[in-house]
Amino acid sequence: MPRIELFPPIEPYETGTMPVDDIHTIYWEQSGNPHGVPVVFLHGGPGAGASATHRRFFDPSHYRIVVLDQRGAGRSTPLGETRRNTTGLLVDDLERLRTRLGIDRWHVFGGSWGSTLALAYAESHPERCLALVLRGIFLMRRREIDWFLYSMRVIHPEAWERFAGFVPAEERGDLLEAYHRLLNSDDPAVRMAAARTWSIYEGACSTLLPSPELVSISGEDNHALSLARIEAHYFRDGLFEPEDRLLRDIDRIRHIPTVIVQGRYDIVCPIVTADELRRAWPEAEYVVVPDGGHSAMEPGVRAALVAATERFKRIG
């Protein structure tokens, strides 16, 4: 059977910004069918921002596609801002946007950090969720963060050597603290160099086969700065209390139709985390892509994601 491809490129029919406090203003857009079933796309990172490609997971004749850039990411301002940037506030922003757009309930689609935020949002507001599509599961626990910082070297030693080698030798025992310092340096050149190194490390580890295109995108200034600064901020100061809260509160969302898509060879968010979620939530449909890495653009991963949004047309 041929793999399902992304839908053709489309442009938004509406874009806007929404101040959420006296620091942050959020970018949002709508595309597809203005009278269709609402779906909100939650980008990864945190801090990665959304792109035009992300509209293409959804049939534009059926879905009213809502895409936003989370605090400090993408087209939201200020870029890379970590003050007043927490998971709880991002959840509040989603509710504020849903209300502003006059949406009662919507599908929620999120990958990597977007899966984290989707779970946190759904567990806080289950009555607003028609269905969930989750990819590359990340539950933001300390062992997952330590894997990213240290253990990905088992598979990608060259990328890790470049990542760790950017930090002074005497600080490599705590890479997160070292990068947090560098990413918040008063010297913009130091901040930018650290951001590029962090972001390229993640990009280099995100596909099953090397992707020079993804590595190049990862090194772009705005993308790298928001991704690295906000990821380091969340990894250092944004853990849940208790740490396993998302798993602990699955009963709140057990009834919501859900598809979990996981690449077998996802190195950034390894499959063991998705397997834990699947065991805690057997009601969810679990799709393992046998030739997939972390990126949503891996052919098998994107096909599974589009297949899920197609099946969920029956809901809503």
Image (cartoon, rainbow, N blue to C red):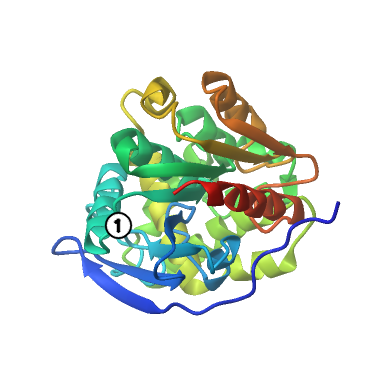
Q: Position of residue 101 (x, y in %)?
A: 27, 64
Q: Position of residue 209 (x, y in %)?
A: 80, 54
Tell me which residue sits at (23%, 68%) in the image.
18
Q: Can residue 33 be seen here?
A: yes
Label 1: how many Cα within 10 Å (few below 14, some 14–19, many 20+): some
The relative height of residue 219 versus residue 266 in the rendered view (above or below) is below
Q: Amino acid at mark 1?
A: Ile
Tell me which residue sits at (60%, 52%) in the image.
163
Residue occupying the far right of the picture: 1
The relative height of residue 121 versus residue 276 in the rendered view (above or below) is below
Whether residue 22 sits left or right of residue 296 in the image: it is left
- For residue 98, which quarter of the picture? bottom left
Task: Say what secondary structure mark 1 lies in.
Answer: loop
Residue corresponding to mark 1: 103
Between 52 and 7, the residue placed more toward the observer is 7
Between 291 and 305, the residue placed more toward the observer is 305
Q: Position of residue 119 (x, y in %)?
A: 42, 37
Count of picture labels: 1
Tell me which residue sits at (38%, 63%) in the image.
68
Between 105 and 275, the residue placed more toward the observer is 105
Q: Position of residue 180 (x, y in %)?
A: 39, 50
Tell me which residue sits at (69%, 40%) in the image.
153
The relative height of residue 144 versus residue 305 in the rendered view (above or below) is above
Q: Can residue 206 be seen here?
A: no
- For residue 251, which quarter of the picture? top left
The relative height of residue 284 versus residue 187 in the rendered view (above or below) is above
